[in-house]
Image (cartoon, rainbow, N blue to C red):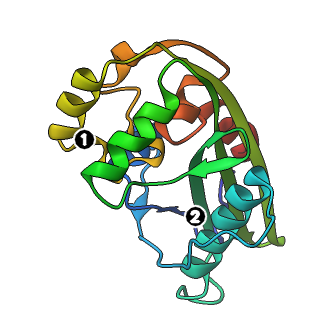
Amino acid sequence: MAASPTEKPLRLILASASPRRRELLAGLGCPFEVISPRIDETPWANEAPANFALRMAHEKAMAVVVGLPTREPVRVIAADTIVVLGRMILGKPANAAEAEATLRLLSGQRHHVITGLCVWTRDAAGFAAQGEAVHTEVVFNAVSDDAIRAYVATGEPMDKAGSYAIQGGAAGMVAGIDGSYTNVVGLPMEALARLLG
């Protein structure tokens, strides 16, 4: 959206500490800044995984918005990515043992990666929030315990939902995907482009 001569340009903010999301967003070629929100990331009882991911994205966006000047034109992009096996949400591992256990669960299995995406905009026309939950199906090869231990020893799984990075050392564990690759990395660029217009 182009700003009129009397209108301030939109300030673009990524509400995430994830370096993967920063790299993906930088690919759009638009200048942006990063503000990392702090929220409670505990699922509600019986909360559907997609609803949880979308709620987390909205809460991250709002946690950033409340700290901004009230009249400033701004667009905040927030995302939350989870790995789901059945209805079990596999979050970031607390330690190496948990990372190994998660990867054993995923070995030889089909699971889903869901990213809740929120774009919150305030401009001369007012404010609006758009959201979408993006699903990608991922199939893992059968992975040996030795391979799992070696991968966890690299430290890469420790800040990743589902204890793996498809763009990193876990690439060889993945037999195939159905859906957005960038969604599995952490920011579904196809959906984001739609929401940004």
Relative height, residue 16 to residue 60 (above, below): above
**First along the sequence among labels 2 and 1:** 2
Q: Which mark is residue 66?
A: none
Q: Secondary structure at mark 1?
A: helix
Q: Position of residue 45 (x, y in %)?
A: 77, 71
User: Which of labels 2 and 1 is toward the front?
Assistant: 1
Q: Is residue 46 left or right of residue 105?
A: right
**Front residue of 143 and 180:** 143
**Front residue of 66 and 171:** 171
**Front residue of 79 and 124:** 79
Disc 2: CA contacts within 10 A as few (<14), some (14-19) or many (>=20) = some
Disc 1: CA contacts within 10 A as few (<14), some (14-19) or many (>=20) = some
Q: Is residue 18 left or right of residue 105?
A: left
As measured in the structure, the alpha-carbon distance from the residue carrying label 2 to the one carrying label 1 is: 38 Å
The answer to the question of whether label 2 and label 1 lie on touching residues, with beta carbons closer than 8 A, is no
Q: Quadrant of residue 138?
A: top right
Q: Quadrant of residue 129?
A: bottom right
Name which residue lies at 65% across and 73% down: 59
The reply to whether residue 27 is visible in this rendering is no
Residue marked by disc 1: 156
Q: Position of residue 173 (x, y in %)?
A: 39, 17
* Amino acid on which the number 2 mark rests in the picture: Pro
Name which residue lies at 47% across and 45% down: 30
The reply to whether residue 86 is visible in this rendering is yes
**Front residue of 152 and 159:** 152
Q: Which mark is residue 9?
A: 2
* Amino acid on which the number 1 mark rests in the picture: Glu
Q: Is residue 126 left or right of residue 8?
A: right
